[in-house]
Amino acid sequence: MPATRVILFLLLFFPLTPVFPAIGWAQAPESLDHLVAQALISNPEVKASAERWQMTVERARQAGALDDPMMMLRVQNALIRDPLDFKRDAMTAKVIGISQKLPFFGKRQLMRDEAGFDAEAERWVVEERRIELRRMVKETWYQISLIDRSLETVAATVNLLDDLIRLAESMYGVGKAGQQEVFQAQLERSKMEEMRIGLEQKRRSLAASLNTLVYRQAETAIPVIPRMTLTPLSLSAAELERLAFAHRPALKSLQARIDRTGASARLAEKEFYPDVTVSLEYMQRDPAMDSPGDDMYGAELTFNLPIQTERRHAKVAEIEAERRMAIQELAVLQNRIRLEISDGLAQLERSSKLTRLYDKGILIQAGGTVESAMAAYQTDKAKFSEVLSSRMALFNFEREYHGAVADHQMQLAVLEGVVGTPLFPIP
């Protein structure tokens, strides 16, 4: 009897050797920075945003350009009874002319400024999408890493439970243990198998999501991600806020739209002044009716009368409302950034404290509980179910420890997205 309990004790405390699943375990691990870089280059959403920005750039190149000049050809004062005889009447002339519309002084530059601010705003939208993509890649990576750690723990626990089941069966065969002990161990093993199936399915889904972000085949194998350590963050909320206000592309995009409304308002005020059309004509005449047929020219200056002031005042009011809206949207985003930084730091502190608590306290205490239960079982003061229960509790604490580490790293990725710039090099 003592020998069997010694064997059981060794099984319970033998180091958990990971049994790796078949999903890409033999391949060399990919680095996170490589995946982020590949996603930023290949992701079609980022490319589409870049092309949309290019559209606004080309549109800005068109802004403020003059309209095409108008060419005019005319026969003037020709006789209907002989329309092709240009020498019958001294007033008959063949006329060629050209005209050009000229916007009021300053309008063209304001049109260029307006379109330029549009392009600038769209450029920062592209950068915002890149930051969002970087965050999504990192979060998915850390989620897969957490599943890999859980699969390692589950695989090792399944092997341990197999040994416990064989030991319980042998003890039951000699009448040293009850059949319920065998059933308890088998039930825990079945739960582990159920958990393994769910984790493997979730890993495949996350791997497909990561491959989609990188824009490659969804079935591409993602090798096992190495164990990660906690990355500390030494920046305060005030420092993160300053970084965000200096680097966040969404803020810069909104500021560009505010600047655009300023150019649009000045352009709308210019609409109270007339545009001018300049025309020049040359008239060629043939000699007729004792007239030498001297050639003639004509010059013309026309302009619109901006008397529809109600429409123009409404346009100015509309742009001012748009400007006020953009200013408030900027304030809303700044306020949201402050909240997200505060919430993110709180979550980082929580996950960091939990990690230290598990590492320095709970895991050690849970291990001590297992040891105590084993000692009590050796002296017939504890049941096999108590030993098994304490060991499964230790398993759950190990998973929660890895979850706290992954949560910490994912929250760092979220904070980077809030700030709009990397907080430290990717490990």
Image (cartoon, rainbow, N blue to C red):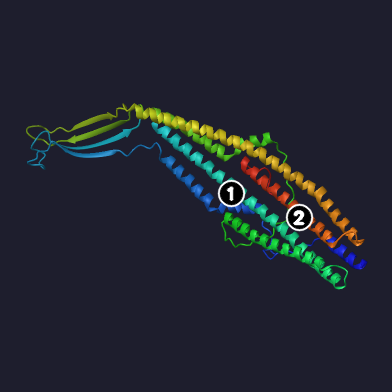
Q: Residues within 10 Å of mark 2 (few under 14, many from 20)?
A: some
Label 1 – label 2 distance at C-alpha: 32 Å
- Please tell me which residue is depicted at 55% across the width and 37% down the height of the picture: 252
Q: Which residue is mark 2?
A: 396
Q: Is residue 298 visible?
A: yes
Q: Is residue 232 visible?
A: no
Question: Which one is in front, 86 or 383?
Answer: 383
Proximity of marks 1 and 2: CB atoms separated by less than 8 Å: no
Q: Nearer the viewer, residue 33 or 161?
A: 161
Towards the viewer: 285 or 422 = 422
Circle 2 SS class:
helix
Tell me residue 192's x, y (percent).
Answer: 73, 62
Q: Compared with residue 88, is residue 381 higher up or lower down, i.e. above or below?
A: below
Kind of residue at disc 1: Leu
At 87% across and 62% down in the image, what residue appears?
9
Q: Quadrant of residue 7?
A: bottom right
> Residue 413 appears at what percent x and percent y?
65, 46
User: Mark 1 or mark 2: which is in front?
Assistant: 2
Hey, what amino acid is under mark 2?
Answer: Asn
Which secondary structure, mark 1?
Answer: helix
Q: Residue at x 75, y 51 (%)?
A: 401
Q: Residues within 10 Å of mark 1 (few under 14, many from 20)?
A: many
- Residue furthest to the bottom in view is 173
Residue identified by numbered label 1? 133
Query: How far across and down, in percent of the image, does residue 271 sit?
Result: 36, 29
Q: Is residue 311 left or right of residue 173?
A: left
